[in-house]
Amino acid sequence: MKKFNFLFLLAFVLLAGTQSFGQLAIDKGTKFINLGIGVGGYGYYTVGGGIGLNAAADFGVTKNITVGAVAGYKSYGSVGAYKYNSFDIGARGSYHFNELLSLTSDAVDLYAGLGLSYYSFSYGGYLDNYGAVYLPIHLGGRYFFSQNVGGFAELGSSLATLKLGVTFKL
């Protein structure tokens, strides 16, 4: 019985050790989907408040680098007859720092990047619209609760300054 307990304990320690010293690999073919909400804003047209909805997809193209798409929508306020709506859609690229920082957890993903997006802003009462192309930056992290599902947080200069939500690794 002591031999069995020792073997069981040894197997547990070896499995736990390999699990805690693994690293989340970002390689060609890695896919992430983020779905979340965003608060705050950057620039004159997004400081009015409101909670936005956002989505992003990232696809691994090479080791530690992903490219993808991002979209967001925010509607807020009613000042008199004015209701503010804004959305953005675009492409982005990210560098994942896990290997560079020697992160030993396979549950953590730290990344930063730059995008190219179209931003549109309109307000009711008038049919005034504003649109522009801009270069949003982002700095984010993911924490996986299981192999394929986790949470994410992202700071950036897009429709929302802070984005929070759920992430899926496909």
Image (cartoon, rainbow, N blue to C red):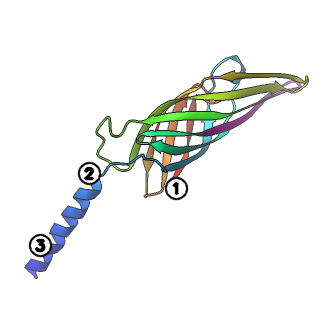
Which numbered disc flags the more N-terminal residue, 3 or 2?
Answer: 3
Q: Closest to the observer: 150 or 21? A: 21
Residue at which label 3 appears: 6
In the picture, residue 51 is in which quadrant? top right
Name the front one of labels 3 and 1. Answer: 1
Label 3–label 1 contact, CB within 8 A: no
Give the label, 3 or 2, closer to the camera: 2
Name the chief secondary structure element in magenta: strand
Judge whether residue 127 can be spotted in this image. Answer: yes
Q: CA distance from mark 3 to mark 2?
A: 22 Å
**Left or right of residue 76: residue 107:** left
Mark 1 in CB contact with mark 2 (< 8 angstroms): no
Q: Which residue is mark 1?
A: 170
Name the residue: 38% across, 48% down. 25
Amino acid type, mark 2: Phe
Q: Measuring 45% from the left and 34% from the top, which residue is drawn there? A: 95
- Which residue, given by chain and number where applicable, does mark 2 sit on? 21
Q: Is residue 33 above or below residue 133?
A: below
Residue 121 point in image, percent of width and height: 77, 25
Task: Give residue 114's quadrant in the image.
Answer: top right
Numbered disc 1: secondary structure: loop
Q: CA distance from mark 3 to mark 1?
A: 38 Å
Q: Give, as a three-letter code, the residue at label 1.
A: Leu
Question: First in sequence: mark 3 or mark 1?
Answer: 3
Q: Residue furthest left?
A: 2
Mark 2, secondary structure of its residue: loop
Q: Camera-side residue: 85 or 59?
A: 59
The region drawn magenta spans 69-84
Asked if residue 3 is among those painted magenta in the image, a careful observer would answer no
**Which is more N-terminal, label 2 or label 1?**
2
| Marker disc for residue 13 | none
